[in-house]
Structures are given as structure tokens and as C-alpha cells.
């Protein structure tokens, strides 16, 4: 029986061979996206993983070693996958409990179109800062804000922009955020130094966005043009199908309170889902089996108001599976590239052209952007460039805070 090959038996790929799986994956992605018009990058990335595996075999790797590299990097995403599962449960259950409908109802009755976009961005930033998840913020509070914006006849892209701006600001500087913890972890720094180092760019970006949404509210959006008939139709449909009460906001308050106490995000989100399930049964009269169905498959209702139905018919763990599968496949592709030495060969070629801090910083940024373009996954675009460039920064005497 032949013994497994030791690391010294593996060949190092040259630059052309290292680029082969990346270039071919990009070509398959381009066909899928631009020729077929289908934005589902899962299979192209899986094909890329297979191509990388063939490159690894050519270099002398056994499939077992390549598989270990794939699973090692996938392991990085498991906390985030768990958060997505909890978020899916929360969305379905909080709609059934009346928490999301109550947020929409009070938003339509208390806010004005002029300040809505700026207020939406601030609200999402606070919630995301507390929860540590942009996904959770967009899927819960953001969902309610989309309904409020629709009631005000505000173009959906303006509301979506405000929601995403606030959610990602809070997520970026929250010590509970998975990506905010991942970046310093892979570069060898601590999370609070990492957050402090981001403030000079993050705060000005937030202020600029806030001013834009404030100006848009007062200049681009006609507050007098909001259809009160439309608002009345939405609020009447919500009252007809749900019990509306400020007490129904308690599940959201519970999650935020647990986050403020720095409880781990997964138990906090799961507690919010349980609180929503109990509320749905006690207040809305939902059965136990229905609650379980909503948590798994999402909420379903026909109110007769299309704007409400399109917002409330969603949620559940299954609604997150498209994203979860993309995360797992993308990270698997990145793990194969890393294990076979393709990433090392590419970075080695880049570093032969880089001699200054400006050059290495530019290279790191472009590598992160390119990784995200190829894989379509933020976790991979943090983890792999962080692992690739951290030794280079230390070797050149630069703080890895600049990299994180």
C-alpha cells in the first residue's frame, strides 16, 4: 500500500494554472448571468469547485485533502448560517404574531413621508447595531418599513436603500456582528480595535447617506401625494386580519434587550422566535401546528390588499435555503482554491509587483472585491484575502488593522 503524499510531494501551481479555475468559473458565471439571464450562481460555483479539484489532482493532491480544505473553510460560515436559519424562523413567526403588522400599522399612522426615509435609516442602524445582523434587521424591521413606504407611495428603491444603508452601518460596527468579528479574526487583530479603526470612514458615509435621505424626503418625495385611501386600505386590512397592539412589539423588544446585554446572537434570535410563537398562539389564536409551519415554510395570508399580501407572505427557514446554499458552495469553492495553492500562487504573483503600503492596500481591496464578484459571498471575500495578506502586512511592518 502506498502512503499518502506528504506536503512536499505536492506541486505548486504556476500562475496560469492557478488562474484556470477562476477564469473558467467566471466564464460559466457570465453565461449563466448574461446569456441565460439567470442570476443563480450556485451551479457555476459548484462547477468551479470541480475544476479546482481537477487542478488539485493534477498537482498531486488526493481528493481527501482537497475535501478537508473545502470543509475547513465552510466551517467559518456555520455561525452565519445559524443566524440565517433563526432569521427565517423569526420572519414567519413575527408576521403570524402580529409584531410585523403592528410595526407597519403604527408606522403608517405616526410617521410622515417627509422624514420617513431618514427615520427608516436611523431605525435600521440602531436595530442592526443591537442585533449584530443586517439580515435580521432587513428581514424584520426592514420588512415593516417597506410596507410603510408602500403605504406612503414612496418608490420602493428609496425605501430599500434607506433600509440597507442603516442595516449595514449597524452591522459593520456592531461587536455582535459575524462579519465584524470575522475580519479581525482572520487578520489577527481584536474586534474593538477593528471597529475603532473603521470609524473615520464609516461615520462620514453614514452622515452623507442620512443627508441624502433627508433631502429626498423633503424635495423628491411629495408628502401631499401620499394616498390616504391607500393608507386607510392597508391599515384596515391589518386591523381586519390581526390584533394590533403595542404589546405585540415585545418579541422585538426582547431580542434587542438581549443583544444590549451582549447575549450571543443565536440564542437571542431564537428567544425572539419563541416569544413570537407564544404571542401568535395567545393573541392571534394561531394553532401550534400553524406556528411550526410558519417557522419552517413562511407565513401565508390573503387580505385582498396586494401591497400587504406581497409583504406578509414570506419568511420561514426554507426561504433562507437559497442564500444558505450559496454561502456553503461559495466557501467550498474558496476552500478548494486555498487548499490547492491556487490562491497562494495568485497572491505571490501580485506581491512581486507590490513594494509600498499603498500598493499592498490596493491589492488587498481589489482581491476582496474580485473574490466577492467570483463567489458572490461576503464571508469568503473576508476570510480568504484576510488569510492571504495578513503575513504580507506583518512582513512589511504594517498593522493588520489596515487589512481588517
Image (spheres, grey):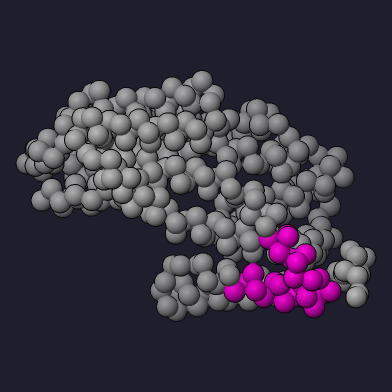
Whether residue 207 is visible to the viewer of this picture, yes or no, is no
Percent position of residue 20, x then y: 70, 75
Q: Quadrant of residue 279?
A: top left
Residue sitting at x 79%, y 61%: 344
Q: In which quarter of the image is residue 102?
A: top left
Our reading of the magenta stretch's main secondary structure is: helix
Is 66 magenta? The answer is yes
Residue sitting at x 36%, y 50%: 296
Whether residue 12 is visible to the viewer of this picture, yes or no, is yes
Numbered-mark total: 0
Percent position of residue 367, x then y: 67, 56
Q: Tell me the quadrant of the picture where the C terminus can be found.
A: top right
Left-right relation of 233 to 8: left
Residue sitting at x 58%, y 30%: 175
- In the image, 356 versus 392, the foreground residue is 392
- In the image, 168 versus 106, the foreground residue is 106
Is 77 magenta? The answer is no
Left-right relation of 1 to 142: right
Left-right relation of 91 to 199: left
Percent position of residue 80, x then y: 54, 45
Residue sitting at x 31%, y 40%: 93
- Vertical comparison of 270 with 293: above or below: above
* Residue furthest left in the image: 229
Q: Tell me the quadrant of the picture where the N terminus can be found.
A: bottom right
Percent position of residue 97, x then y: 26, 35
- Vertical comparison of 335 with 57: above or below: above
- Vertical comparison of 90 with 323: above or below: above
Q: Magenta part of the protein: which range? A: 47-70
Amino acid at each position: 500500500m502506498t502512503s499518502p503524499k506528504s506536503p512536499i510531494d505536492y506541486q505548486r501551481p504556476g500562475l496560469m494554472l492557478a488562474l484556470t479555475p477562476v477564469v473558467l468559473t467566471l466564464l460559466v458565471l457570465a453565461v449563466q448571468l448574461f446569456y441565460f439571464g439567470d442570476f443563480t450562481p450556485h451551479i457555476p460555483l459548484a462547477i468551479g469547485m470541480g475544476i479546482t479539484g481537477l487542478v488539485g489532482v493534477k498537482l498531486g493532491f488526493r481528493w481527501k485533502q482537497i475535501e478537508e480544505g473545502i470543509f475547513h473553510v465552510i466551517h467559518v460560515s456555520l455561525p452565519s448560517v445559524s443566524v440565517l436559519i433563526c432569521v427565517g424562523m423569526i420572519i414567519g413567526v413575527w408576521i403570524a404574531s402580529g409584531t410585523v403588522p403592528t410595526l407597519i400599522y403604527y408606522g403608517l399612522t405616526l410617521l410622515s413621508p417627509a422624514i420617513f426615509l431618514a427615520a427608516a435609516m436611523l431605525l435600521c442602524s440602531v436595530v442592526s447595531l443591537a442585533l449584530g445582523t443586517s439580515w435580521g434587521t432587513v428581514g424584520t424591521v426592514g420588512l415593516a418599513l417597506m410596507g410603510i413606504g408602500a403605504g406612503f407611495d414612496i418608490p420602493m428603491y428609496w425605501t430599500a436603500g434607506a433600509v440597507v444603508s442603516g442595516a449595514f452601518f449597524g452591522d459593520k460596527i456592531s461587536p455582535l456582528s459575524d462579519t465584524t468579528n470575522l475580519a479581525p479574526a482572520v487578520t489577527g487583530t481584536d474586534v474593538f480595535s477593528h471597529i475603532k479603526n473603521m470609524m473615520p470612514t464609516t461615520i462620514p458615509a453614514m452622515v452623507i447617506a442620512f443627508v441624502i435621505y433627508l433631502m429626498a424626503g423633503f424635495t423628491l418625495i411629495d408628502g401631499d401625494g401620499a394616498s390616504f385611501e391607500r393608507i386607510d386600505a392597508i391599515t384596515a386590512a391589518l386591523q381586519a386580519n390581526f390584533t394590533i397592539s403595542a404589546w405585540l412589539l415585545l418579541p422585538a423588544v426582547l431580542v434587542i434587550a438581549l443583544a444590549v446585554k451582549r447575549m450571543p446572537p443565536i440564542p437571542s434570535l431564537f428567544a425572539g422566535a419563541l416569544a413570537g410563537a407564544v404571542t401568535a398562539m395567545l393573541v392571534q389564536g394561531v394553532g401550534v401546528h400553524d406556528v411550526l409551519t410558519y417557522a419552517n415554510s413562511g407565513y401565508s395570508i390573503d387580505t385582498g390588499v396586494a401591497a400587504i399580501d406581497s409583504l406578509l407572505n414570506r419568511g420561514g427557514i426554507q426561504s433562507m435555503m437559497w442564500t444558505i446554499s450559496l454561502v456553503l458552495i461559495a466557501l467550498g469553492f474558496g476552500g478548494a482554491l486555498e487548499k490547492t495553492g491556487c490562491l497562494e500562487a495568485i497572491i505571490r504573483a501580485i506581491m512581486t509587483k507590490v513594494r509600498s503600503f499603498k500598493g499592498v492596500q490596493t491589492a488587498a481591496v481589489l482581491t476582496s472585491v474580485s473574490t466577492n464578484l467570483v463567489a458572490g459571498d461576503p464571508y469568503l471575500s473576508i476570510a480568504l484575502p484576510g488569510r492571504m495578506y495578513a503575513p504580507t502586512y506583518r512582513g512589511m511592518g504594517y498593522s493588520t488593522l489596515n487589512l481588517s
